[in-house]
Image (cartoon, helix red, strand yellow):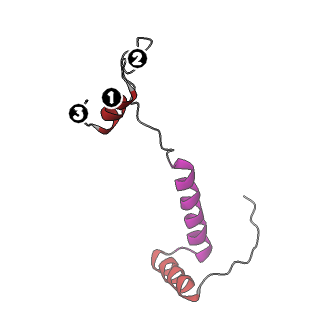
Amino acid sequence: MHTMKTTVDISDALLARAKRHAQKVGKPLRAIIEDGLRRVLHEESAAVRYRLPDRSVGRAGGENPLDALSWQDLRAEIYGEPRA
């Protein structure tokens, strides 16, 4: 595994917490930082894209039961209002 040195700006408080955590779990600070980056990148790649639920009406390939409705009736159907 190839490693690269880099410099990042981290708040003093966050760095102090990370150092304490590293000492507590017996890992080098570098491993704690790498673990955190891996976790963030994994969560990002594992995020599920939102899919619209299927709200189809009628049967697939069949006649659309909403075609026969007037605009007012269709609006009432959409908003759950009683039809005129």
Left or right of residue 17, residue 2 in this image: right
> Which of the two discs, 1 and 2, sits closer to the camera?
1
- Quarter of the image with the C terminus in it: top left
Q: Which residue is mark 3?
A: 82
Q: Quadrant of residue 3?
A: bottom right
Residue 37 location in percent, x, y? 59, 64
Left or right of residue 10, residue 3 in this image: right
The amino acid at mark 3 is Pro
Q: Residue furthest front?
A: 84
Q: Which residue is mark 2?
A: 64
Magenta region, residue range: 27-47
> Which of the two discs, 3 and 2, sits closer to the camera?
3
The amino acid at mark 2 is Asn
The relative height of residue 66 versus residue 72 in the rendered view (above or below) is: above
**Callout 1 crowding tier (Cα within 10 Å): few <14, some 14–19, many ≥20:** some
Q: Main secondary structure of the magenta part?
A: helix
Q: Counting residues from the N terminus, which is met first, the one under dot 3 or under dot 2?
A: 2
Q: Which residue is mark 1?
A: 73
The relative height of residue 17 versus residue 33 in the rendered view (above or below) is: below
State yes or no: discs 1 and 2 in contact (Cβ < 8 Å): no
- Identify the residue at horizontal 37%, vertical 24% (top origin): 70
Q: Counting residues from the N terminus, which is met first, the one under dot 3 or under dot 1?
A: 1
Residue sitting nearer the eye, 78 or 57? 78
Q: Counting residues from the N terminus, which is met first, the one under dot 1 or under dot 2?
A: 2
The amino acid at mark 1 is Asp
Residue 28 location in percent, x, y? 58, 75
**Callout 3 crowding tier (Cα within 10 Å): few <14, some 14–19, many ≥20:** few
- Between the residue at mark 1 and the residue at mark 2, the CA separation in whole angstroms equals 15 Å
Please say whether residue 46 is one of the residues in the magenta stretch: yes
Q: Quadrant of residue 6?
A: bottom right
The relative height of residue 4 versus residue 1 in the rendered view (above or below) is: below
